Image: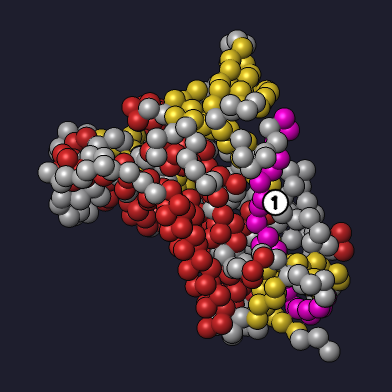
Amino acid sequence: MAEQFDITIIGAGPGGYVAAVRGAQLGLKVAIIEKEKDAKLGGTCGLRGCIPTKALLQSAHLYDKAGHFAEHGIKIENLGYDWAQVQKRKSTIVDKNAAGVTYLMKKNKVTVFNGFGKIVGKGKIEVTKADGKKETIETKNIIIATGSVVKPFPGFETDGKQVVNSDQILELDRVPKSMIVMGSGAVGVEFASVYARFGCQTTVVEFMPRIVPVEDEEVSKELARSFKKQGIKVETGIKLEKLTKSKSGVKATGKNDKGAEVSFEAEMFLVAVGRMPFLEGLGLENTKVKVSERGTVEVNEYCETAEPGIFAIGDVIATPWLAHLASKEGILVVEKLAGKKVEPINMRLVPNCTYCDPEVASVGLTEAKAREEGYDVKVGKFPFSASGKARILGETDGFVKIVSEKKYDEVLGVHIIGPHATELLAEACVAMALETTADELGRVIHAHPTVSESIMEAAEGVHDLTIHM
């Protein structure tokens, strides 16, 4: 008789493995299935997404900083970089993270199955191993946490050399002389920040009227301004239609928002648009699970599918595709299964972080969205150019923007572009979770000198009480 589990999770990314640990902590018998070669755990985020890209960004940031050391009286002669070592460091970090997840599974007595999981019946999953051998798992509950994969873009097929996607660009053996980046979401602007800092002439091409289009409009404008100052070309309102390759490079052609023909040439082309849920071969046809027209699994606010006992979290459902949200969705599911009282996740409080340079981070409503929803909006802003600590860091681009409403003074959204934005945002998340007012946030004593003071100053700015501006 096959071993029976309380929960079996298909996919060991930040949604799956976190759910596994929490389930084990609550006394449930948990199994996790991962198809990744070499039995590496961590999913797209750990192996091909969050972790490796941020490792490259850190190296690029330090290299850029080193170019300004003379301002600090620090002399460096013949500054250069070793790209092979940059890549080696990235890979070492990825491997250590993957090993860390494996350790967590062992520590929490989570059974790991290496292979491809397919639902074959009620509470039954067939695991096909690398050698073709099959094993059947019996389980009371199933969590689908298979994440997303790069979506092919017709006419812009990748070859891993001249035309690359977000997976392939992580493994480049050199820095190209020039690059066109199609798409200015998190993937596009982060890789633009990496390669431009290592000397690649970079052009970001975006279909929408502005870059990082999900962010507040003022943040988009500030990032475009900063990119241009750094030498990164920004082209918006452009629909690329054709890509041609030659021995010397690639040529992308299309039309701008006025209908005029445009073209761009470079050594390399990055397709930084499009991912899709990975559901192929999971056996959903053997269940009542419903899939939307967009290819996402349909779930309720507790991540329950139409099939009792089957749940879905992370990039396979229609909530924002963010590692930290996937983790919380996984925790929500297992705590509910363990009999805990749980509340649906407040999607307005999901933080959004982009690790380009300068960093971009936000939570809650943009100014435009708040007005659209009928709020009587008041805004407070504070520029990092007026921050003593930002001057010390030599990173004065950007600002903190707080969106609040007049009647109750409640903070509706916080938008940051600038130094350590992705770290600073945590304060805003806590404050908004506690339904803080702008007045309360402005009265909290912030240490000096810190860049976090800018949040306090922006909150005071809602009532026109900013001190240092």
Q: Position of residue 85 (x, y in %)?
A: 42, 54
Give the residue drawn at x 58%, y 17%. Answer: 263
The amino acid type of the residue labelled 1 equals: Pro
Closer to the camera, 439 or 187? 187
Closer to the camera, 177 or 393? 177
Q: How many numbered marks have been drawn onto this rendered protein structure?
A: 1
Which quadrant, please, contains the N terminus?
bottom right
Q: Position of residue 309 (x, y in %)?
A: 75, 70
Given the current orientation, which residue lies at the most extreme left position?
Answer: 73
Residue 164 occupies which quadrant of the picture?
top right
The stretch in magenta equals: 134-155
Judged by its main secondary structure, the magenta piece is: strand
Q: Is residue 132 above or below residue 191?
A: below
Q: Label 1: which residue?
A: 277
User: Is 5 one of the magenta-colored residues?
Assistant: no
Give the residue drawn at x 57%, y 65%. Answer: 42
Q: Position of residue 388 (x, y in %)?
A: 15, 42
Give the residue drawn at x 60%, y 61%. Answer: 43
Give the residue drawn at x 16%, y 39%. Answer: 71
User: Is 144 one of the magenta-colored residues?
Assistant: yes
Q: Secondary structure beneath disc 1?
A: strand
Give neighbour class at mark 1: few <14, some 14-19, many 20+ (Cα, 10 Å). Answer: many
Residue 127 occupies which quadrant of the picture?
bottom right
Q: Is residue 211 visible?
A: no
- 218 with respect to 323 (left or right): left
Q: Is residue 358 above or below residue 443?
A: above
